DNA sequence: ACCATTATTTATCATTTGTAAAATTTTATT
DNA sequence: AATAAAATTTTACAAATGATAAATAATGGT
């Protein structure tokens, strides 16, 4: 997926503004299982996914909790680092080999102070992520684990083929055993 | 709480930009139990809470699910309306008599297109809300209902005195009976 | 202060989900 | 194809939460 397209699906930018961003972006590649970001650090870059799929997870005692999947066209950003300059609580792990567009957070912050349209792009980005997150939070309360699983299947049909069920279970907020039970009841 | 202070705690604005917003804001008052926003409508205003406390809730079949409380200094906005011009899924109900600063969403959108600092204010607002929402989503997975209750007590000590436990239970994602059990085990 | 209403707690039982361990299936490697 | 490793499912049991109804406490209006 091309960077122009990725940027525009957040908020269409005038040519000039778009080029300011593109000029500061580099392409990088990492292999499967690479740890792109680690919890506890302030992360200096953000990434747009050209191809591949990743997960964000947080440590809980001895286990890991996956709370986000990102694939083609999505943006990888440690919100705490990006917003507040604080260390993030999330690890980002590549679940496939990925091609990423890399951008220094500092440079983007600079652009936010220079360019009205880029500031509005940043606003739209956060707003859209917010709606998605809010909807997930509410869906936790509204829907049973089985419903959430079915919805995930419907919304992201390819996901099951690309991601281990253990991560899916964690993402849905249930144990893998519970997810197995749900899957067996459906068929 | 003064509007200037409310705006500044999101993102400090230069005097000129701040006045552009303040000039478009009016003060309104509503009584307890007033329904400020209704699900299924596109909401044309946003509000800053000068005093009082409100809840956002969504309908689930025969019951209501409270997913947010807002009090002094917080911003009331139907995210779907504000971001996407779509009807929201939330009702906003006043739990106390409130004094609110009212702003037309359309006028704010206009300011986003005119003023770089206001666009960045809007960006910061969404980013901060996003972090809060993301943390709540993760806390759902990390923590037991009892832990979440204790945290809510610690973070918002006054809340229990201002809000019925039925709403608190719903906010925590448990039934009122469950919350009662938790409360009795603590003491 | 009294009554009616609403809010909260308690009790009982059913359901769901979690934990731990073993069994099975799938995948990767030689 | 055979083996080892990893992923997934199954089983048995424990713990947490839900549903319903009844009991108690708190609140608001007259």
Image (cartoon, coloured by chain):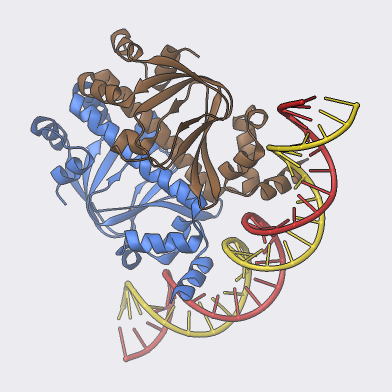
Chain colours: A brown, B blue, C red, D yellow
Q: Is residue B44 visible?
A: no
Residue located at (69% from left, 49% from top): A177
Question: Which residue occupies the foreground of this view, A44 or B44?
Answer: A44
Give the image location of residue A68, x and y in percent: 51, 36
Give the image location of residue A40, x and y in percent: 39, 42
**Horizontal side, residue B98 vs residue D16: left or right:** left
Residue located at (51% from left, 53% from top): A61
Query: Where B93 sits versus B158, above or below?
Result: above
Quadrant of the drawing holding the C terminus of chain A: top right
Question: Which residue occupies the foreground of this view, B45 or B155?
Answer: B155
Residue at the left extreme of this rendering: B15
Q: Is residue B110 visible?
A: yes
Give the image location of residue B155, x and y in percent: 33, 59
The answer to which image quadrant residue B149 occupies is: bottom left
Query: Where B38 sits versus B179, above or below?
Result: above
**Horizontal side, residue B93 vs residue B58: left or right:** left
The answer to which image quadrant residue B171 occupies is: bottom left
Residue located at (41% from left, 46% from top): B135
Question: Which residue occupies the foreground of this view, A187 or A43?
Answer: A43
Give the image location of residue B57, x and y in percent: 43, 50
Question: Which residue occupies the foreground of this view, A70 or B10?
Answer: A70
Residue located at (46% from left, 57% from top): B172
**Total numbered labels placed on residues in the image:** 0
Query: Where A2 sits versus B86, above or below?
Result: above
């Amino acid at each position: 997926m091309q960077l122009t397209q990725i940027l525009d699906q957040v908020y269409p930018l005038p040519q000039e503004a778009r080029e300011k961003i593109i000029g500061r972006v580099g392409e990088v590649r990492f292999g499967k299982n690479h740890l792109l970001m680690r919890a506890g650090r302030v992360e200096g870059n953000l990434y747009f996914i050209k191809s591949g799929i990743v997960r964000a997870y947080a440590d809980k005692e001895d286990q890991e909790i996956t709370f986000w999947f990102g694939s083609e066209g999505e943006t990888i950003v440690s919100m705490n680092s990006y917003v507040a300059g604080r260390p993030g609580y999330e690890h980002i792990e590549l679940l496939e080999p990925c091609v990423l567009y890399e951008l220094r957070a500092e440079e983007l912050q600079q652009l936010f102070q220079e360019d009205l349209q880029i500031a509005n792009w940043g606003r739209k980005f956060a707003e859209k992520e917010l709606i998605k997150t809010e909807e997930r939070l509410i869906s936790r309360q509204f829907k049973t684990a089985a419903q959430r699983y079915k919805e995930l299947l419907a919304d992201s049909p390819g996901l099951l083929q690309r991601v281990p069920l253990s991560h899916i279970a964690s993402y849905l907020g249930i144990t893998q055993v519970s997810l197995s039970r749900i899957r067996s009841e459906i068929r």
